[in-house]
C-alpha cells in the first residue's frame, strides 16, 4: 500500500497477521522509492525489544496505544517535520533498559567516518537537542548545525534523527546519564 499511496506518514502496528510491523517498517524504510515516508509505530506493547527493533528498522517514532489522540496527532506532525518522537513511557523504559545492559565497546569503524565536530553534533542530537539548540551550544548558525547533522546522518547511514540517536547511544557518544548541555 505504501508504494501505491506514497503517504507522508505510516502509522504501523507491531503485531499484524501477515507481516509483522517491524519487518514492514524495514521494507518501507529500505525502499529508495519510499525515502520520504516516515513511520510511527503505534502498539499495545511498549517492550524494549520492539522499540529497539522498530528504530533500527527505520521508524521515526514509537507510541503506545494508550497515547491520547491529541498527542498522536502532535507526534505525526513532529515526525512529518523530520524529527523523531518516542512516547514518554517508552522513553523511560528505553533508558532504564539501556542503563541495565552491559557496556559495549564503541563502534570505532563507524565513528571513524565522522569528524570530531560531527561526533560532537551526534552526541548533542543523542541528548535530544534541536538544530537551534545545537547551534547555540556550539556557537554556530542553525544552518551550519543542520548541515553537520545531515552529513553525519549520511555518513552513518541514518535515515532520520531517530536512527542518529540510536547510533549515538550504540557508539557510546552519549549515555543515558549524560545531562544535556546548559
Image (cartoon, rainbow, N blue to C red):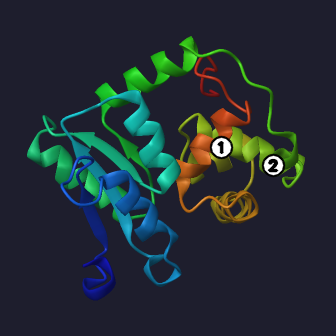
Comparing 97 with 119, the one in front is: 97
Q: Residue at x 34, y 56 (%)?
A: 78
**Which part of the image, by quadrant, shows the C terminus?**
top right
Q: Is residue 125 visible?
A: no
- Residue 45 placed where, x, y %? 24, 33
Marks 2 and 1 close (CB-CB < 8 Å): yes
Q: In the visual, does 93 lie left or right of 116? A: left
**Which part of the image, by quadrant, shows the N terminus?**
bottom left
- Residue 86 placed where, x, y %? 36, 40
Judging by the rendered image, the residue that carries numbered circle 2 is 110
- Residue 177 placed where, x, y %? 60, 16
- Residue 73 placed where, x, y %? 18, 54
Comparing 115 with 146, the one in front is: 115
Q: Residues within 10 Å of mark 2 (few under 14, many from 20)?
A: few
Q: Which mark is residue 14?
A: none
Along the polypeptide, which appears first: circle 2 or circle 1? 2
In the picture as drawn, the residue positioned furthest to the top comes out as: 100
Q: Residue at x 22, y 42 (%)?
A: 43
Q: Residue at x 26, y 56 (%)?
A: 12
Q: Residues within 10 Å of mark 1 (few under 14, many from 20)?
A: many
The quadrant in which residue 169 appears is top right
Q: Residue at x 44, y 26 (%)?
A: 94
In the picture as drawn, the residue positioned furthest to the left comes out as: 69
Q: In the visual, does 70 lie left or right of 39? A: left
SS for dot 1: helix
SS for dot 2: helix
Q: In the visual, does 155 lie left or right of 167? A: right
Q: Which mark is residue 167?
A: 1
The quadrant in which residue 18 appears is bottom left
Q: CA distance from mark 2 to mark 1?
A: 9 Å
Q: Is residue 135 visible?
A: yes
Comparing 1 with 75, the one in front is: 1
Amino acid at each position: 500500500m505504501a508504494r501505491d499511496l506514497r503517504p507522508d506518514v505510516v502509522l504501523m502496528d507491531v503485531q499484524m497477521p501477515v507481516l509483522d510491523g517491524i519487518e514492514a517498517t524495514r521494507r518501507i524504510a529500505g525502499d529508495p522509492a519510499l525515502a520520504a515516508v516516515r513511520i510511527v509505530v503505534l502498539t499495545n506493547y511498549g517492550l524494549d525489544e520492539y522499540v529497539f527493533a522498530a528504530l533500527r528498522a527505520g521508524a521515526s517514532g514509537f507510541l503506545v496505544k494508550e497515547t491520547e489522540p491529541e498527542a498522536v496527532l502532535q507526534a505525526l506532525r513532529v515526525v512529518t517535520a523530520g524529527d523523531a518522537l518516542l512516547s514518554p513511557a517508552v522513553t523511560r523504559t528505553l533508558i532504564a533498559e539501556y542503563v541495565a545492559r552491559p557496556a559495549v565497546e564503541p563502534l570505532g569503524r563507524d565513528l571513524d567516518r565522522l569528524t570530531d565536530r560531527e561526533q560532537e553534533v551526534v552526541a548533542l542530537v543523542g541528548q535530544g537537542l534541536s538544530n537551534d539548540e545545537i547551534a547555540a551550544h556550539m556557537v554556530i548558525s542553525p544552518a551550519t548545525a543542520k548541515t553537520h547533522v545531515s552529513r553525519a546522518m549520511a555518513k552513518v547511514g541514518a535515515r532520520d534523527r531517530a536512527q542518529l540517536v540510536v547510533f549515538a547511544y550504540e557508539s557510546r557518544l552519549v549515555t543515558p546519564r549524560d545531562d544535556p548541555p546548559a
